[in-house]
Image (spheres, helix red, strand yellow):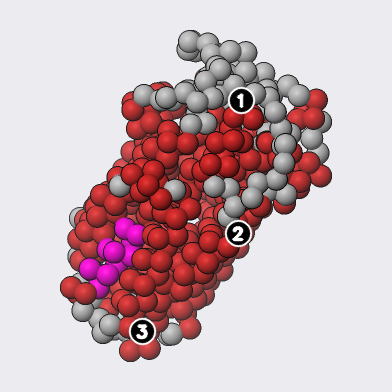
Amino acid sequence: MSEIVEKIIDKSSEPPIDGQGQNDAGNKKLSWKEKISYGFGDCGNGFMFDLGQAYLTKYWIDVCMIPAVAVAGIFAFTKIFDAFMDPIAGSLIDRRKNIGPRGKFRPVMMISSILLGILTVITFTMPDFLSGGEKVFFAYGAYMLWGLVYSFTNIPYGSLASVMTRDVNERSQMATTRQVGSVGAQLLTGIGFVPILLMFSNPHQGFLVASIIMAIIGVLGFYICYRNTREHVKVNRNTTAEQNAGFKDYAKTIFTNRPLICLILMTLFTISAMNTNMQMMIFFCQYNLGNLSLQPIINGIMMGCSVLGILLMPKLVRRFGKKKTAIGGLLIGCFANILNFIIPTNIYSFVFLVTIGYAALAIPNGVTWAFVSDVIDYGEWHNGIRKEGITYAAFNFSRKIAQALAAVVSSGILALTGYVANAVQTEVTLTGIKAAMTLYPGVALGVAAIILSILYNLSDDNYKKIALDLENGVWEKGKIE
């Protein structure tokens, strides 16, 4: 893939940075144009990724008539498969040679995003002539291929932030723009997808047209990111150790990085909580609230408020630090979701509490992107080998497992409680939908807060010392407290 990318993209002109695609700007102050453009990448990502998390369960069960237990299996297996593909993708990206003036990560990200857009549409396509078993097979194949290409899109995008700047405040602001982009995509897909769907009497056509529109917007988001960002941080990519790194070095990169291990464990719970919420919202509105048209309205309220909360993130980080800010958001989300489960279902209390829970979770999810860039630098400082791709792939591994867990919780509860597509549901099923929508996220966020408070030991002050060492070409001089 790297050779194709270099031939297609690196031929065109762009002001050179240096021979490895970076300049000497570790603490560079980025322009707002560049920081906002970086956020557009996750906006583009969301237009394709969030469709699968929020609507594929509904499409496969209610439109394609695939049994809920089979859908749970599709999500679980494909996400685990994707998780194991991430380290392979990260390793291949890390091993890119002859890096051109456009840098190491941006070309791979751009080409892969185009392929991802095409595959997004394919996942929402089901040929009429297929039988029940063949539909399941088609869904497996399409979603597995989608996940593989997603790895080659998301890993270079996530790694890009670590080579744009090492400045703590700049990274916090980039994490903010990224999270605004992500939630903005959730907002627009959340309020736009169902109205497009309802314009068509044939649901297959509705899902297809909606997915085409969202995929096009998604690719455009990645193009804005690709066009307006640069890899500024000077990184020595020609060291003998890095070129000769093998499996043991990759394992060392991951398993000796305590902050990374903490993020992996925390993410299992935060992302599974968020994805379960997204997947169950359409079911909750249709059956528990009795009106599918409420779904885009509720999504608009809770995601719109999330954007406002995220905009406060840089101020919160400056005052409390990244760790305390993230823990605070997790605890607020925990209590709001559990309370939402305990209170009898009411449209007003549900919208109020689900909005608080979702907005609170958006803040630690945003801070996490700054954490990831920090742990990439920590790994280089700690081991003397810089592996952005494999480090981000390890983090992304946990996101894929979390997505599989969310699918098992969502589809599994539907199957266990006797869900019947497009029918009046029993009280047991309605309770199961509500539990997946509120109780599971509440418990998961509480566990995530405990993990972060106990295991994460890379404070902002410690990171500034590490960044200074890296700027001076010095590797680990001692252990962080």
Between circles 1 and 3, the one closer to the viewer is: 1
Q: What is the crowding at mark 2: few (fewer than 14 residues within 10 Å), some, or many (at least 20)?
A: some
Q: Is residue 293 left or right of residue 281?
A: left
Q: Residue at x 37, y 76 (%)?
A: 338
Spot occupied by residue 363 in the image (x, y as percentages of width and height):
38, 53
Look at mark 3 in the image and give the residue it sits on.
431
Task: Note whether 451 is above or below 344 in the view shown.
Answer: above
**3D distance between C-alphas at marks 1 and 3:** 55 Å
Name which of mark 3 and mark 2 comes first in the sequence.
3
Residue 455's disc is 2
- Circles 3 and 2, Cβ within 8 Å, touching? The answer is no
The quadrant in which the N terminus is found is top right
User: Image quadrant of residue 381?
Assistant: top right
In the picture as drawn, the residue positioned furthest to the bottom comes out as 427
Look at mark 1 in the image and give the residue it sits on.
471
Q: What is the crowding at mark 1: few (fewer than 14 residues within 10 Å), some, or many (at least 20)?
A: some
* Secondary structure mostly taken by the magenta-highlighted segment of the chain: helix
Q: What is the crowding at mark 3: few (fewer than 14 residues within 10 Å), some, or many (at least 20)?
A: some
What SS does tag 3 mark? Answer: helix
Task: Note whether 21 is above or below 186 in the view shown.
Answer: above
**3D distance between C-alphas at marks 3 and 2:** 35 Å
Q: What amino acid type should be assigned to the residue bearing mark 2?
A: Leu
